């Protein structure tokens, strides 16, 4: 009997160890086994990945008889599907469109085959005539090679040495009698005579050789028809197999189809652009069969790297055989080299662009890999198959390594690339990165193409984020040596960038002088580097700015503050993730000593901190900014007045007169029939971008017309009819003729106090120009929201596509419609009938005025045999 009167079994059932939710208890041996298993887990994952890759490669190799025709069929399907869809739009059923497309393709291939065969036959007939020329050239070349030259002495010396060595070896061999000499047996030569085959056997062997490619071609043709017939069904099955996110899978399939289709179309254009000039050039040079070699060169260029070299052999060999001298061969070689240089360096980069997204190394490695697996067909299919792997790497997280290995896009962001280069003090590469980034920004943003704007952009987008990376890795990842190298590299990079883009001399203060604008690092070395970047940017915009080369230090010693007696604006650089206390401490002491100084604090390492005016007031600063471009505008606003306006109206563009003329000639200002198009575009923009507002604006001389907008007037629940041009953000798009994105209107002094922006609570704006066919900016399509957004989160390419689609629809709607053939015939018939009626009426009036019509001809009717009387003239009266 237990003292508590309970059953031991019930105690066991209710004990914590037996509770179902209690974690299992492990002893030391179990923990050691778990740690050992966790240690070998990465190796097991790698081994399993290698095993899966090996199994896939083996399946590709051993299943090539089935996979090669299927891959060729899919590739041809990509090439032929646009023609099928075009025929469907013209009214043909899909089945008929497919058979017409396949018949056209087969007819083109058959005609090309007959043409090439005829050219080869005629060339084969004429080759014996060039036999004597080839023999003479070969003899001349041989005599030139065998004639004495500058290396004759060296060759003779090596020959004598070889004879001496071989002679000593022969003497040693002669001293030792061989077994064959002792036996005295003679060596007999045995020759195997080939078996004579009958004509039937030879025909069978020939048919056996051609049956395999014919069978493969038949399978490919069947697969092509099936792929074209069930295109949508195959697409849906692939989406089902991928599973998961249907949006992601759809985008992946679309991207693969677009990249492969564009690659094939551009490859066709490039090959024609190479083969046609080659044929013309060979014909002018006099090489026989010039059209044949042009077609062969165009076809062989489908084989990467190897194809162009193989295609060049034939015309070079013929020019060697035909020409009596060496001129034809040299001209042919020069023609091929010139076309290769033009095609590889001008035409292909211009047409291809980023059509495949593959790096050059990836293309070469993939060509080698697929050739080893599938032979010459694998070489042709290498690029499309590798593009599919690249798309899989972008779409499936587990295969992201494929994008890193195969893609042409940089795998590091620009700040990471700058940080990595400065870690090893590679300032030259860092400067190359800066120049390329500035050049790209000036190309992509015509409205900010000036050097001050471009340099400020690289500070905002590259340099300050790189300093942020250094600040975050200061104590956790970077060693003392790495921090030392980065600081030295960044100082040198900032100095070289200032030398490459120098400001005006008037903006440079004297040594040790605190200028009207002074930049100061709050605490760390990265703060001082940011202060140097801030001063350079302010100088480029025309401000006389100075900066302190060293920060105040970890304890922020106030005795290290410079003399700010002549300073109007102090720009603080702060990289602390929690900068409020630092800024308040410095601002309080600065205002006590120099109360006239205005303080603008740049907070470069607290992206989640809301830089509101209330926060600036709490930390005793005039303004808080998160971007260097905003700091430049704040300083400019503090130092200058704007003539009574608190916002910046957009200046007119240089081609304002031509732009206004194009707007008024377009008919858009008076087009009520386009209202439905406008409203539909605004609705689709709001839904696609998940924004609160969208608007279409037509930019006139003094007024912005808004034929479609979701904004309403502040006092009335009616759509906004328009607004003055000076208050419109869209006017800035016309001014710079480029897209415009404002992440936060309250952080941009051009719009922070704009009455139109404030009235509608607008915080975000993104707009693209509406261009006519001559490139004139007639208006803008824009999206707006009452919350700030990052520019990287907005698909500006989609917004530009919607704008171009709208302008194409408006052009089609407003252009004069040509009458159809039936309408033209009816109009012509009606016009003829009216003219005949008028003619009959005139004849009747004339008959009535002359009495009876028969009296003029002596009472007889006027017949065709009787010539009409000549009208009475003045001469007759006389």
Image (cartoon, helix red, strand yellow):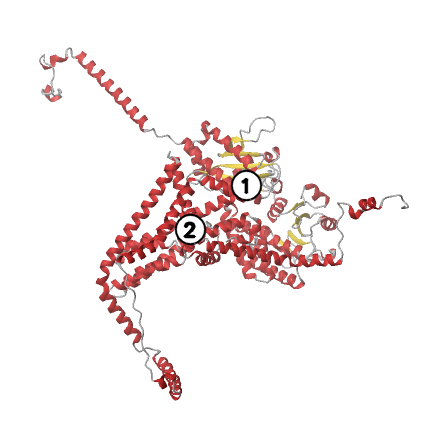
Compared with 664, 472 (above or below) is below
639 horizontally vs 121: left or right = right
849 horizontally vs 170: left or right = left
Compared with 100, 481 (above or below) is below
670 horizontally vs 846: left or right = right
| Residue underneath mark 2 | 350
Is there a contact, CB below 8 Å, between mark 2 and mark 1? Answer: no
Q: Give the residue at x 72% y 45%.
A: 620
Residue 33 versus residue 701: which sits nearer the camera?
Answer: 33
Q: Earlier in the sequence, mark 2 or mark 1?
A: 1
Compared with 837, 791 (above or below) is below
877 horizontally vs 707: left or right = left
Quadrant assignment for the C terminus: top left
Q: Horizontal and vertical percent for residue 225? A: 39, 42
Q: Horizontal and vertical percent for residue 516? A: 64, 51
In whole angstroms, how far apart are the C-alphas of marks 2 and 1? 34 Å
Residue 132 versus residue 642: which sits nearer the camera?
Answer: 132
| Residue underneath mark 1 | 246
């Amino acid at each position: 009997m237990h003292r508590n009167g309970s059953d031991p079994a019930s105690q066991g059932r209710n004990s914590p160890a037996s509770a179902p939710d209690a974690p299992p208890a492990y002893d030391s041996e179990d923990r050691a086994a778990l740690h050992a298993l966790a240690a070998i887990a990465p190796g097991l994952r790698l081994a399993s990945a290698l095993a899966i890759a090996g199994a896939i490669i083996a399946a590709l190799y051993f299943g090539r008889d089935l996979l090669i025709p299927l891959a060729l069929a899919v590739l041809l399907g990509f090439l032929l599907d646009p023609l099928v869809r075009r025929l469907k739009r013209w009214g043909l059923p899909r089945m008929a469109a497919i058979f017409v497309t396949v018949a056209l393709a087969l007819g083109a291939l058959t005609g090309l085959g007959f043409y090439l065969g005829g050219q080869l036959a005629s060339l084969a007939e004429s080759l014996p005539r060039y036999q004597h020329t080839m023999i003479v050239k070969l003899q001349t070349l041989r005599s030139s090679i065998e004639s004495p030259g500058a290396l004759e002495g060296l060759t003779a010396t090596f020959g004598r040495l070889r004879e001496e060595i071989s002679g000593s070896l022969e003497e040693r061999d002669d001293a030792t009698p061989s077994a064959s000499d002792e036996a005295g047996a003679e060596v007999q030569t045995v020759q195997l005579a080939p078996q004579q085959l009958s004509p039937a056997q030879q025909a069978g062997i020939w048919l056996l050789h051609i049956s395999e490619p014919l069978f493969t071609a038949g399978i490919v043709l069947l697969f092509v028809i099936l792929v074209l017939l069930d295109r949508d069904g195959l697409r849906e099955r692939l989406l089902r197999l991928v599973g998961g996110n249907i949006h992601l899978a759809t985008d992946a399939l679309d991207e693969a189809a677009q990249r492969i289709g564009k690659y094939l179309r551009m490859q066709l254009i490039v090959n024609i652009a190479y083969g046609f000039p080659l044929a013309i050039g060979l014909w002018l040079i006099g090489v026989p069969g010039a059209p044949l070699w042009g077609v062969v060169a165009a076809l062989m260029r489908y084989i990467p790297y190897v194809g162009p070299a193989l295609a060049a052999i034939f015309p070079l060999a013929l020019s060697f055989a035909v020409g009596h001298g060496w001129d034809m061969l040299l001209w042919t070689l020069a023609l091929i080299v010139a076309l290769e240089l033009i095609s590889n360096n001008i035409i292909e980069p211009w047409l291809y662009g980023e059509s495949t997204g593959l790096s050059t190394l990836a293309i070469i490695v993939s060509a080698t890999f697929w050739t080893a697996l599938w032979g010459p067909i694998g070489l042709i299919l290498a690029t499309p198959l590798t593009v599919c792997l690249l798309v899989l790497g972008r779409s499936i997280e587990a295969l992201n390594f494929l994008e890193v290995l195969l893609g042409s896009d940089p795998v590091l962001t620009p700040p990471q690339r700058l940080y990595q280069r400065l870690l090893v003090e590679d300032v030259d590469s860092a400067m190359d990165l800066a120049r390329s980034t500035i050049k790209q920004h000036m190309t992509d943003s015509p409205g900010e193409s000036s050097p001050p704007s471009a340099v400020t952009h690289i500070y905002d987008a590259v340099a300050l984020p790189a300093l942020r990376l250094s600040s975050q890795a200061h104590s956790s990842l970077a060693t003392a040596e790495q921090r030392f190298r980065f600081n030295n590299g960044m100082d040198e990079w900032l100095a070289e960038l200032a030398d490459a883009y120098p400001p005006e001399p008037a903006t440079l203060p004297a040594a040790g002088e605190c200028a009207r604008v002074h930049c100061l690092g709050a605490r760390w070395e990265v703060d001082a580097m940011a202060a140097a970047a801030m001063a350079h940017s302010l100088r480029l915009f025309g401000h006389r700015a100075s900066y302190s080369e060293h920060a105040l230090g970890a304890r922020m010693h106030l005795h290290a503050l410079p003399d700010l007696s002549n300073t109007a604006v102090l720009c603080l650089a702060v990289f602390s993730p929690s900068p409020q206390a630092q800024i308040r401490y410095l601002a309080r002491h600065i205002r006590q000593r120099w109360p006239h100084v205005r303080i603008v604090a740049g907070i470069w390492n607290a992206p989640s901190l809301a830089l509101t005016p209330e926060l600036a007031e709490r930390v005793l600063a005039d303004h808080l900014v998160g971007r260097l471009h905003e700091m430049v505008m704040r300083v400019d606003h503090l130092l200058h007045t704007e003539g009574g306006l608190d916002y910046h109206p957009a200046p007119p563009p240089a081609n304002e007169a031509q732009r206004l003329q194009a707007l008024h000639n377009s008919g858009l200002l008076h087009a009520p029939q386009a209202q439905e198009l406008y409203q539909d575009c605004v609705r689709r923009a709001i839904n696609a971008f998940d924004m609160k507002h969208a608007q279409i604006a037509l930019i006139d001389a003094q007024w912005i017309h808004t034929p479609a907008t979701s904004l309403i007037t502040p006092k009335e629940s009616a759509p906004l009819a328009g607004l003055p041009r000076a208050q419109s953000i869209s006017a800035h798009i016309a001014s710079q003729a480029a897209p415009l994105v404002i992440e936060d209107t309250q952080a941009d002094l051009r719009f922070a106090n704009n009455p139109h922006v404030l009235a509608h609570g607008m915080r975000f704006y993104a707009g693209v120009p509406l261009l006519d066919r001559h490139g004139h900016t007639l208006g803008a399509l824009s999206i707006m929201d009452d919350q700030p957004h990052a520019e990287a989160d907005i698909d500006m390419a989609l917004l530009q596509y919607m704008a171009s689609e709208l302008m194409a629809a408006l052009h089609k709607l407003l252009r004069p419609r040509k009458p159809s053939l039936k309408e033209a015939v009816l109009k012509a018939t009606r016009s003829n009938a009216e003219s005949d009626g008028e003619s009959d009426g005139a004849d009747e009036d004339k008959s009535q005025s002359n009495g009876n019509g028969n009296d003029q001809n002596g009472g007889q009717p006027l017949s065709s045999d009787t010539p009409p009387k000549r009208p009475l003239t003045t001469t007759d009266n006389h």
